[in-house]
């Protein structure tokens, strides 16, 4: 395998507000060229922190304490602010979680779509506008002209998420970070958005880091996945392998917790207490090892 | 990829009415804005519109009551003052000083205050601390005393009045804009803009500023009303323009002395002042509501 597009090695983070509680415990994962890599885990597992660390928007109460994030071999964490800014929006783009707040409420869609194209891709105002229109068509919006002159509050949630996807993929990045892009949407729209991301990703050969708490969503879209619990990667591998033959008890518990529409009598199982106890022991053992060899 | 089902394409809602047509449908904006428009016309066209010379005295026709009252003189619609000058013409000429102060002083205060407020709210850290402490100290001075002191030092005149208002009232803008900017800077859309790698000036002026503008406009029109009042106070105590220029404050001061002989000398400029301030406040309220895309529904 050649150099992966994104390679995270031993990434660790602590919460400064919460008594230096670890958030990420030496997370390592790799996203290959043209690959969709899922990061699944329950809330608080540190999924979003990984996404934020890549984008350089880690909140002030979180501190990265170790590891590296290599994008095409360059360590993002050691870049200057200007260097990172040059990379963001050109090579790396974000599809945010909540489409209702991620668009600027005071600006029309055309202004918001063309900003990135003009400033990061060097397009003229006219070309950017034309490209924005084409992008909206690419994300299956039927009436692009009308959407372009609309304000975000005049669009539905699914529509806004399409606009955000158009904005992200429109910059033709090599890596898209999708941070729970379907969580705020209802289920029917979710499906369309997933298909949309997958088709754009295939067409452009984009690598995607797909963060989600929903194993069902991840199963549909990801080539490979990492299962995260309390900031620790519990299991990693090709999606089919992990889902069909889960090696870790936690993955099995996650699968059992997922609702099954084909078999309504199963699913929605809470994580068994013995699994939680085993997980906590595993985390505690890891923390003890980390204390003994802080940089090992 | 497979075919898209028709449900996958979503149609936009019908095109929203433009901002201008919305503004024209808001009775507040239309009434208050219309009134201020009339004032502007009166101020600009005062020499043509005013029926008489506002300075021409006629002691034989002193304190003539307004039209419709006993002893009213034809041609003096609002009566005359103690020196026989036409009250209506003086009120009309008074709009010149009031509106100049309203627009220039409030505009400058807005410009200075909101620029500092944007910087403080967006940059945070020591910039924010420095500007905020400056505002705190500034606001500790009693405003009326400070303005009188300033005019006393700078000398009377329109420039001094404007300077006094700007120096005192930029803090209002600074405070509100700082808070508003801080709030906006935490919003997802700003974080999203950061992940596209936009520079900080781009984020501040393109992303955040448009969201601060509705508040700013409301504040600006409110400040115009305040500026009109402050100018009237300074005229009232004789610290504004020289006494041969008609001002509402000056007229109120003169009318106060002869209120028992001619109440209208006091009432006319007072009513003009009152209506102007109310109009500015209502206009600000209406504009803020129509310009804010989130409230616009």
Image: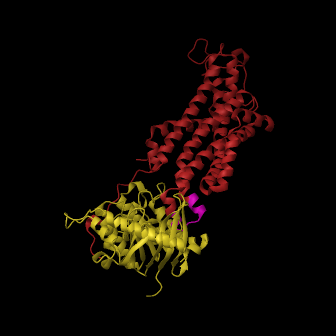
Chain colours: A yellow, B red
Question: In this image, B177 relative to B84: left or right?
Answer: left
The answer to whether residue B200 is magenta is yes
Q: Quadrant of residue A190?
A: bottom left
The answer to whether residue A158 is magenta is no
**What's the magenta region?**
B193-205
Q: Position of residue B98 (x, y in %)?
A: 65, 35
- Look at 74% across and 40% down and name the residue there: B159
Question: In this image, A167 relative to B194: left or right?
Answer: left
Q: Residue placed farthest to the bottom in the image?
A: A1
Work out whether residue B234 can be spotted: yes
- Look at 69% across and 16% down and name the residue there: B258
Q: Quadrant of residue A40?
A: bottom left
Front-most of residues A232 and B56:
A232
Does residue A224 sit above or below A284 in this rendering? below
Q: Quadrant of the N terminus of chain A?
A: bottom left
| Dominant SS type (magenta) | helix
Q: Position of residue B230 (x, y in %)?
A: 67, 33
């Amino acid at each position: 395998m050649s150099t992966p597009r994104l390679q995270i090695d031993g990434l660790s983070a602590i919460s400064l507000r919460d008594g230096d509680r670890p958030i990420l415990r030496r997370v390592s994962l790799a996203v290959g060229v043209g690959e969709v890599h899922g990061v699944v885990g329950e809330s608080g597992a540190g999924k979003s922190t990984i996404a934020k660390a890549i984008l350089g928007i880690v909140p002030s109460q979180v501190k990265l304490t170790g590891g590296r994030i290599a994008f095409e071999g360059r360590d993002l964490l050691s870049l200057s602010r200007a260097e990172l800014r040059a990379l963001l929006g050109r090579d790396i783009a974000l599809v945010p979680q909540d489409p209702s707040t991620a668009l600027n409420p005071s600006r029309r869609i055309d202004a918001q779509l063309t900003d990135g194209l003009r400033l990061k891709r060097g397009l003229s105002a006219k070309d950017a506008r034309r490209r924005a229109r084409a992008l909206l068509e690419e994300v299956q919006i039927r009436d692009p002209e009308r959407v372009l002159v609309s304000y975000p509050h005049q669009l539905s949630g699914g529509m806004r998420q399409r606009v955000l996807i158009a904005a992200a993929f429109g910059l033709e990045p090599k890596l898209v970070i999708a941070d729970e892009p379907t969580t705020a949407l209802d289920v029917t729209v979710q499906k369309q958005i997933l298909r949309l991301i997958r088709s754009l990703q295939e067409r452009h050969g984009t690598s995607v880091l797909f963060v989600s708490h929903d194993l069902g969503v991840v199963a549909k879209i990801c080539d490979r996945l990492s299962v995260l619990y309390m900031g620790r990667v519990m299991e990693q591998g090709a999606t089919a392998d992990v889902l069909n033959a889960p090696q870790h008890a936690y993955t099995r518990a996650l699968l059992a917790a997922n609702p099954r529409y084909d078999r309504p009598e199963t699913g929605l199982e809470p994580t068994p207490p013995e699994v939680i106890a085993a997980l906590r022991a595993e985390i505690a053992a890891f923390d003890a090892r980390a204390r003994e060899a802080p940089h090992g | 990829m497979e075919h898209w089902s028709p449900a996958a394409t979503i149609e936009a809602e019908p095109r929203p009415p433009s901002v201008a047509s919305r503004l024209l449908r808001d009775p507040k904006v239309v009434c208050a804005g219309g009134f201020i428009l009339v004032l502007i016309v009166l101020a600009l066209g005062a020499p043509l519109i005013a029926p008489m010379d506002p300075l021409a005295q006629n002691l034989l026709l002193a304190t003539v009551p307004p039209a419709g009252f006993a002893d009213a003189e034809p041609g003096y619609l609002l009566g005359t003052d103690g020196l026989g000058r036409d009250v209506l013409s003086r009120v009309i000429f008074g709009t010149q000083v009031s509106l100049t102060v309203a627009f220039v002083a409030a505009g400058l205060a807005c410009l200075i205050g909101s620029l500092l407020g944007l910087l403080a709210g967006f940059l945070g850290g020591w910039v924010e601390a420095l500007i905020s402490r400056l505002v705190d100290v500034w606001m500790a001075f009693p405003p009326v005393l400070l303005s009188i002191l300033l005019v006393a030092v700078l000398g009377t005149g329109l420039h001094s009045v404007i300077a006094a208002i700007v120096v005192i009232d930029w803090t209002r803008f600074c405070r509100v804009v700082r808070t508003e900017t801080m709030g906006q800077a935490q919003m997802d859309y700003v974080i999203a803009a950061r992940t596209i790698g936009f520079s900080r000036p781009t984020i501040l002026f393109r992303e955040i500023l448009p969201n601060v503008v509705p508040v700013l406009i409301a504040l600006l029109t409110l400040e115009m009303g305040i500026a009109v009042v402050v100018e009237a106070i300074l005229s009232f105590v004789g610290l504004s323009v020289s006494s041969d220029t008609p001002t509402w404050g000056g007229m109120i001061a003169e009318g106060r002395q002869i209120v028992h002989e001619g109440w209208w000398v006091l009432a006319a400029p007072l009513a003009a002042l009152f209506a102007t301030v109310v109009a500015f406040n209502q206009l600000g309220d209406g504009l803020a509501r129509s310009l804010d895309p989130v409230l616009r529904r």
